[in-house]
Amino acid sequence: MTETTSKYADFEGLRERAVALRREGLSRRQIRDRLHVDNNDILNRLLQGEPAPQWTKRPRAKDDLRERARELRLQGMTYDRIQVELGCSKSSISLWVRDLPKPERRRTREESSAIGRRGWGATLQRREAERRTAKQRAADEIGAMTDRELFLLGVGLYWAEGSKSKPYRTQERVTFVNSDPGMIEVFLAWLRLLGVNGEHLRFHVHIHETADIAAAEQFWGALTGAESSAFGKTSLKRHTPKTNRKNVGENYRGCLAVRVLKSAELYRRIEGSWCGIVGAAKRADSQNRT
């Protein structure tokens, strides 16, 4: 007889003690330590059918799903079927029902795989819904923006994505390039805040030669509201036999370059403002560290 077998030889007696402790309100960890049961499978068998005390259950958003998963498991459903029904991940289901008896297999592996694929599809749909909800909640939290907030945002945007003068190439002019329509809209709003009107702006589309060039030019023209005369010749990225384009589809419109004419003074203001932001951030961080 092995040491493990000897240790749990009086299983029914051990179960009676475990059940009694459970009904007294002890947690699994407390029962494990009290009875010196270091085998989780044995502990699950000892406590099978005994509900956890209320104090060990922390209220969570998924409590209803957990209870429903346990009901479905007791009905004989597999993890795959529960996943299809509830749209939960298998890892969560496993945690919720691991103390319940395992149902007998009633279908082939192929059938189980098909159910699993449907379950994964349901999980992806649930995650996408959660993602959209989180994004909308964050968007709603922004509310109205002051001129100062827009100014600071624009400076940070430009210093991240705009052209900058280099020690080896002094070039104080404002040029902003991006493929994100939202970034372009914010940048143009920022320029209008600073009093830069459309007469001082020039636009250039940069795009792969195999893309829908006409559609891209029309899109950027409509977004900016600029006259066609404000747009320079579109720059095409030429392809080689080894070119493997990944940015494809109807939403690919290349990049738009926005250039401000006679913008040396504006560039210096941006650079100085960025230095001020960095200094202010350091001071704030120093206070937060104390």
Image: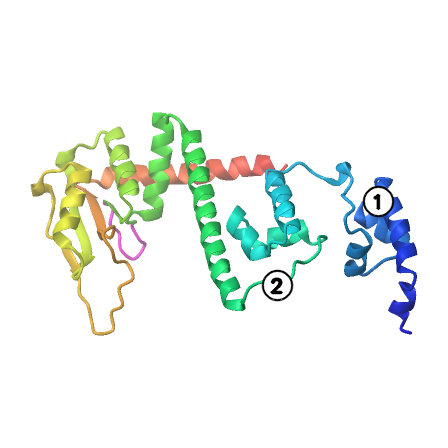
How crowded pointer 1 is (Cα within 10 Å; few <14, some 14-19, many 20+) is rated as some
Residue at 51% in and 51% down? 84
Can residue 87 be seen from the camera position used here? no
Q: Main secondary structure of the magenta part?
A: loop
The foreground one among 65 and 101 is 101
Can residue 183 be seen from the camera position used here? yes
Residue 290 placed where, x, y %?
A: 64, 36
**Which residue has dot 2 on it?**
105
Quarter of the image for the N terminus: give it. bottom right
In this picture, residue 285 sits left or right of residue 210 = right
Position of residue 203 relative to residue 1, above or below, is: above
Q: Is residue 280 magenta?
A: no
Given the image, on which type of amino acid does mark 1 rest? Answer: Arg
The numbered mark at residue 22 is 1
Highlighted magenta segment, given as a residue range: 165-173
Q: What element carries label 1?
A: helix
Q: Is mark 2 on a helix, strand or loop?
A: loop
Position of residue 185 relative to residue 83, above or below, is: above
Q: Is residue 169 magenta?
A: yes
Residue 160 placed where, x, y %?
A: 36, 47
